[in-house]
Amino acid sequence: MSYFYSYGPYAIAVLLAIVIALYTWQRSRLISLIVLSWVALAVIVGQFSFFPGVLKWQDSDWLGFTLFGILSFTPALIMTFASVYLIKFKRFLKEIPVSALILTQTYRIGGVFLLMSYSYNLLPLSVGLVSGVMDVFVAITAVILGIYILNDENKAPRLVISWAVISLLDFVWAVIVIFTSFLGIIDIHPDPIQIGNPPLLIISLFSMPLGIFISIYVIGRMKKELKR
């Protein structure tokens, strides 16, 4: 394995967290510190394998799969809940331009690591190739869309919503494939267990839940703009 593949996912996650922390420092130092603490924990936990051994689900993987799911989706659920019910967090988010929220998704260029895993025969086509290509697509279009609406945040709400839906569907697709594979509903080779092992694990612990939340929040925010 190359150094780029082994350390790239960590580098992207840490860089993203640092950029977000610097951007939000003047608005909320608490948010900045939470983001940095989150990525630090993700890096530490991301050194461990939830599914060690061969590239095939084992009967003993239930515990690891459950823990993997909790750690992957709980942050997104917490942020979504906070964006709806915590007044201070709602105010904080309203101060962030939609273009800035969209541009956070440039980290999805990390889809190249899924493509590399597919080329190494560590992930099946349905996750490595399909999700990898989708991630890269979302990253590139995030830059284009973010720049397009930079000077007029609300000039293309339907376009922004469409982009966010595609971004979210990318995650939904990967989750469905992994979940149904684990349950034995579909038979793919190899089983996508590498997504729960280093170096890809940090994507599920930090980058994915952040991306899920951003997509959901942007959709909700733009829908409100359409109603005005």
Image (cartoon, rainbow, N blue to C red):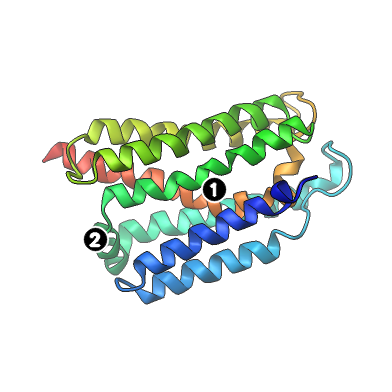
Label 1, secondary structure: give it.
helix
Q: Position of residue 22 (x, y in %)?
A: 40, 68
Q: Would residue 97 appear left or right of 187 to someone viewing this image?
A: left
What is the total number of numbered labels drawn onto the structure image?
2
Q: Position of residue 53 (x, y in %)?
A: 88, 46
Q: Would residue 121 appear left or right of 90 to someone viewing this image?
A: right
Q: Residue at x 80, y 48 (%)?
A: 51
Q: Pointer 1: what residue?
A: 208
Q: Residues within 10 Å of mark 2 (few under 14, many from 20)?
A: few
Using the image, determine if residue 99 lies above or below residue 190: below
Label 2, secondary structure: give it.
loop
- Residue nearer the viewer, 33 or 68: 33
The answer to which image quadrant residue 148 occupies is top left
Residue 189's disc is none
Q: Would residue 78 appear left or right of 176 to someone viewing this image?
A: left
Using the image, determine if residue 6 lies above or below residue 166: below
Residue 195 shows up from this direction? yes
Q: Residue at x 56, y 56 (%)?
A: 13
Outermost residue toward the left in this view: 228
Q: Residue at x 40, y 70 (%)?
A: 31
Q: Pointer 2: what residue?
A: 95
Q: Position of residue 3 (x, y in %)?
A: 74, 51
Q: Amino acid at mark 2?
A: Glu
Compare marks 2 and 1 and give the one earlier in the sequence: 2
For marks 2 and 1, give the CA distance: 23 Å
Q: Position of residue 95 (x, y in %)?
A: 24, 61
- Residue nearer the viewer, 82 or 97: 97
Q: Amino acid at mark 1?
A: Met
Residue 70 shows up from this direction? no
Q: Residue at x 32, y 45 (%)?
A: 218
Q: Residues within 10 Å of mark 1 (few under 14, many from 20)?
A: many
